[in-house]
Image (cartoon, grey):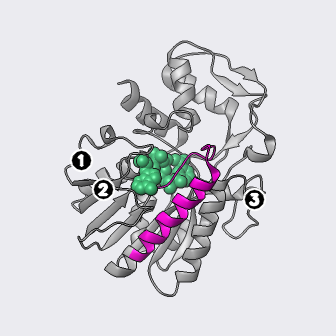
Amino acid sequence: MKCLVTGGAGFIGSNLALELEKQGHEVTVVDNLLSGTKDNLKDFKGKFVELDVSKPFEINDKFDVIFHQAAITDPRYPDDKETYRANIEGFNNIVNLAKKNNAKLVYASTAGLYGNGPVPMKEDQKKEILSSYGKSKLEMDDIATELFDKMHIVGLRYFNVFGPRETHKGRPASMIYHLSKQIKDGKKPRIFKMGEQKRDHIYVKDAVDATILAVYAKKSCIVNVGTGIGTNFNELVRVLNEVLGKNLEPEYFDMTYDPKTYQSNTQADPTKATEFLGFKSKWTLKDGIKDYMGWLYG
Ligand SMILES: NC(=O)c1ccc[n+]([C@@H]2O[C@H](COP(=O)([O-])OP(=O)(O)OC[C@H]3O[C@@H](n4cnc5c(N)ncnc54)[C@H](O)[C@@H]3O)[C@@H](O)[C@H]2O)c1
């Protein structure tokens, strides 16, 4: 199939573009390089177009599927208005492009919408908007829901994705990336007191799998993309130490974020993704970390 990947120089987008290409699809990547980097596309053979999807643009190629990953992805990006504008205008432009092409649309939403709501998090539970980023993603989901009967559109609420090609993100990169660096450097891994906060960490290879399966979803829908397992920070440090052959005790420090804007416990209910997409995560946390550490440190 002919695919367009927006945000394809970013973390999930570059892994997706490379996997699609490996599976024999024809792939075009567009990205404005706001947070992403062309380094992520070193092995990519397809077409790369530098453009901002939140501004008017012309693409004359025809696509069967559009994977929309492009967004201002840092929930703490300093300009709230611009986060909202760029994410919503970008989404609307891509919806129009999909309509024009009669293409299927698979786009990235976020588990951030559940805020500090109950776990396991279900798609229809009450949302808690913690940032302008969250507000923009919820509005995208609302726009998509209105289109369910008119086109094939699937929204993916990714949980905490980690893996190769996320280094460019800096602070917003996964905690697995940051803690592994500290441990690798022989430093005590720094986590918030007392390490009981939980995350549903999903390996990027699983996230990419779910994203491709979404093309063949039974029907238009919005689903969680997580493992269904919440792992606390202490346990994560233990697994990282084990994989990296170290034994460094955590250094606890006071949480620096406003607790109202910080998710302290994420865990997906993955039932709907299994039902609609046939998706089930395959990588255990330990195996995903092992694979990733091999890529990161050789
Ligand atoms: N990584 C995660 O854990 C996670 C969790 C939930 C949701 N998401 C969503 O998944 C998608 C991909 O996230 P990521 O982690 O790969 O982030 P990323 O920052 O690495 O990738 C986003 C890419 O989009 C590009 N971009 C931004 N604005 C653009 C614009 N207007 N036009 C063209 N390109 C633009 C950036 O340059 C970057 O390459 C995002 O939509 C994000 O909100 C990610």
The answer as to whether callout 3 falls within 8 Å of ligand 1 is: no
Place of residue 122 in the rendered image (x, y in percent of width and height, measured from the top left):
69, 64
> Which residue matches tag 2?
29
The picture quadrant where one finds residue 111 is: bottom right
Circle 2: element type: strand
Give the amino acid at mark 2: Val
Whether residue 77 appears in this view of the structure is yes
In the image, taking residue 172 as reference, residue 295 lies left or right, namely left
The picture quadrant where one finds residue 5 is: bottom left
The magenta region covers 70-96
> Which residue matches tag 1?
44
What's the CA distance linking mark 2 and mark 3? 32 Å
Give the amino acid at mark 3: Glu
Mark drawn on residue 101: none
Mark 3 Cα-neighbour bin, 10 Å: few <14, some 14–19, many ≥20: some
In the displayed structure, 134 sits above or below 186; it is: below
- Which one is in front, 241 or 167? 167
In the displayed structure, 225 sits above or below 286; it is: below
Of labels 3 and 1, earlier in sequence is 1
**Was residue 99 drawn as part of the magenta stretch in this picture?**
no
What residue is drawn where x is 41% and y is 61%? 53
Q: Are marks 2 and 1 in contact (CB under 8 Å)?
A: yes
> Which residue matches tag 3?
128
The answer as to whether callout 2 falls within 8 Å of ligand 1 is: no
What residue is drawn where x is 45% and y is 39%? 166
